[in-house]
């Protein structure tokens, strides 16, 4: 199948550091290539891929305080993808509503995976204009604020089977992985670990916008022996970090549409203690790959039951449910369905 | 003629305070209505117009640190204008390259007035993709960095004939009007006024991004008797402000594509001492409506020659060359040409 993947341009594919969407686009693209498909990736020029790369700007560039400068590479991408559309069997966009006015008026089947939250007003205002533009939700929970949008499927993320793996280690701490921010639940993670008498290791990015929160709220709670901040880590350090953890703490305070760190933990056999929000009930199997709880107190109680979980079984569930190959197969099935529906309509 | 005006959405039309593009769109729209055309304005919902207003968002909202939130109203606008396109004889866009992928693929004649500078890399990268999308430059100088783009005309701005007018007054100071920023030349304006022994009155906005510049560079130069900062003023105060000024100082440090304050000054009979940059030589007639100079020293020398200029003649040149009616007539002539070319091609 001739497939175009159209990625955001604020990060390369894969991203150099933090960037969930670009990681998923990378893993999907690589899996599709491995499966024998003819894949073209429209992305920033510093992307690395086994697919054919069509560079849309020299290199990824961060959001700036200028409407036109942010938008110009996207306008250029929309036009170049449109001109090439007839060369593909399907166009898979990861850039929200940007393609719709153009691609609802041409004939190559296309779809858009929504990677973000859908509870803002403007979501309904824009997406509802396009009832014929098929959307993919990354969890069923993501659809909650906007159930009437034209969702064609929910396809849960997956990651490469061998990117992270269990490493023999003694589990001596709880892990927090991701980003320092109120919605990621770092303060509750610290409370849970302290109450359990277990050390918390925090591997996290501190974004510019979260710096005040970090300095005012989080930094005072850090103390070397009990709560240790080790900074942002990349994939090469995650297997060791998660293999040495009794559990990943994921006490999120927002309806995160998909939490990649949960499947990263499972890939290392590390169970997850997570708050029942967003995608959590669709990702974690309570009592099997972790515990789903509603409060800090329940999380503390769940921690006592961690020895009842089998880390090898956690890894096995990862292999069964959370690989990029499974995700890619789900997408290919959807591509085929959309192509068939298009043929039927013609 | 059935004309659609499509305005930016970060400000209402007209803008509540500062906002050159939205002021020009307002003046053009009102003039076209007065001339008997059937005009529809696609703009923020808090706009005020004699045309039919199609609100694109409840009210104008400033740029935010979120790509999707900034873009959603524009995506919605592009789609709604596209659906209504057949109801118009011509579509006149003021939102840069955003319409091109959609409107180069439909049949209603359209044009885009470029209101900003064209010397950034991304300008060529995007605009050069669309050789059939007619552009209007707001001065010939604006084209300099990108002469090969498909310009259909240069149409200089104009403003309503009776919005500002000369008010009998003694001229006791030099005026600076606009925005505090390095590129607007405020420091040179202060140097010129000091050297001439003439008081400088500064009526200017201080933008958030220019606050450090103001505090570090400009504020120390302010002293009540000789250099007075009177804050941002609206149109109702400009006639008095400019009528009492010996001259407007416009020592810009950047190639401003069009400086509206120059024609505001002329409307009040106030001559302009301006640096030879950007649109200045196309707007000021040296020795008639002001003096065009290259240096601070030349500006000081020119100030001595101000008594040779006739303020009534300055106002008369404004009426001949710089009214919104003249601008609207120029646009209507271009609309007619584009419509005729379209018919010829069909």
Image (cartoon, coloured by chain):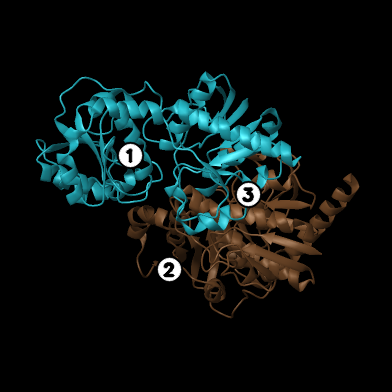
Chain colours: A brown, B cyan
Coordinates of residue B201 in the picture (x, y in percent):
19, 35
Question: Which residue is rendered at x = 52% and y = 75% of the image?
Answer: A237
Q: Nearest the camera: B187 or B318?
A: B318
> The residue tagged with tag 1: helix, strand or loop?
loop
Q: CA distance from mark 2 to mark 3?
A: 31 Å
- Chain under disc 2: A
- Chain under disc 3: A
- Chain under disc 1: B
Question: Which residue is rendered at x = 43% and y = 35% of the image?
Answer: B157
Q: Residue A231 got which mark?
A: 2
Question: Dot 1 surroundings within 10 Å: few (below 14), some, or many (20 or more)?
Answer: many
B4 left or right of B253? right
Q: Is residue B69 visible?
A: no
Coordinates of residue A325 in the picture (x, y in percent):
74, 68
Coordinates of residue B238 in the picture (x, y in percent):
28, 27
A191 left or right of A261? left
Q: Is residue A30 visible?
A: yes
Q: CA distance from mark 2 to mark 1?
A: 59 Å
Q: Residue B284 got which mark?
A: 1
Q: Nearest the camera: A258 or B241?
A: B241
User: What residue is disc 3 on?
Assistant: A96
| Numbered label tally | 3
The quadrant where residue B279 appears: top left
């Amino acid at each position: 199948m001739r497939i175009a993947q159209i990625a955001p341009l604020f990060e390369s594919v894969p991203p150099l550091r933090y960037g969930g969407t670009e990681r998923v686009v990378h893993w999907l693209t690589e899996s599709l290539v491995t499966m024998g498909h003819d894949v073209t990736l429209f992305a920033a020029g510093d992307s690395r891929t086994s697919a054919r790369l069509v560079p849309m700007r020299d290199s990824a560039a961060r959001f700036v305080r200028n409407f036109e400068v942010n938008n110009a590479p996207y306008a250029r991408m929309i036009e170049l993808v449109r001109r090439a559309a007839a060369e593909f069997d399907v166009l898979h966009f990861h850039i929200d509503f940007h393609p719709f006015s153009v691609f609802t008026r041409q004939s190559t089947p296309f779809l858009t995976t929504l990677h973000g939250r859908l509870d803002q007003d403007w979501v309904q205002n824009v997406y509802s204009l396009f009832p014929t533009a098929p959307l993919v939700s990354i969890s069923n929970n993501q659809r909650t604020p906007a159930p009437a949008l034209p969702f064609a499927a929910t396809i849960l993320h997956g990651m490469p089977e061998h990117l992270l793996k269990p490493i023999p280690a003694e589990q001596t701490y709880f892990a927090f992985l991701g980003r320092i921010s109120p919605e990621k639940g770092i303060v509750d993670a610290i409370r849970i670990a302290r109450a359990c008498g277990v050390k918390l290791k925090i591997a996290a990015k501190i974004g510019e916008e979260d710096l005040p929160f970090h300095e005012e709220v989080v930094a005072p709670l850090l103390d070397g022996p009990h709560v240790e901040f080790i900074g942002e880590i990349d994939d090469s350090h995650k297997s060791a970090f998660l293999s040495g953890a009794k559990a990943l703490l994921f006490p999120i305070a927002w309806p995160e549409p998909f939490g990649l760190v949960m499947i990263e933990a499972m890939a290392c056999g590390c169970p997850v203690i997570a708050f029942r929000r967003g995608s959590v009930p669709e990702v974690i199997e309570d009592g099997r790959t972790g515990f789903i709880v509603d409060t800090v107190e329940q999380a503390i109680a769940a921690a006592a039951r961690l020895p009842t979980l089998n880390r090898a079984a956690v890894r096995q569930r990862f292999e069964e449910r959370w690989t990029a190959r499974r995700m890619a197969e789900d997408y290919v099935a959807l591509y085929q369905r959309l192509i068939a529906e298009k043929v039927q309509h013609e």
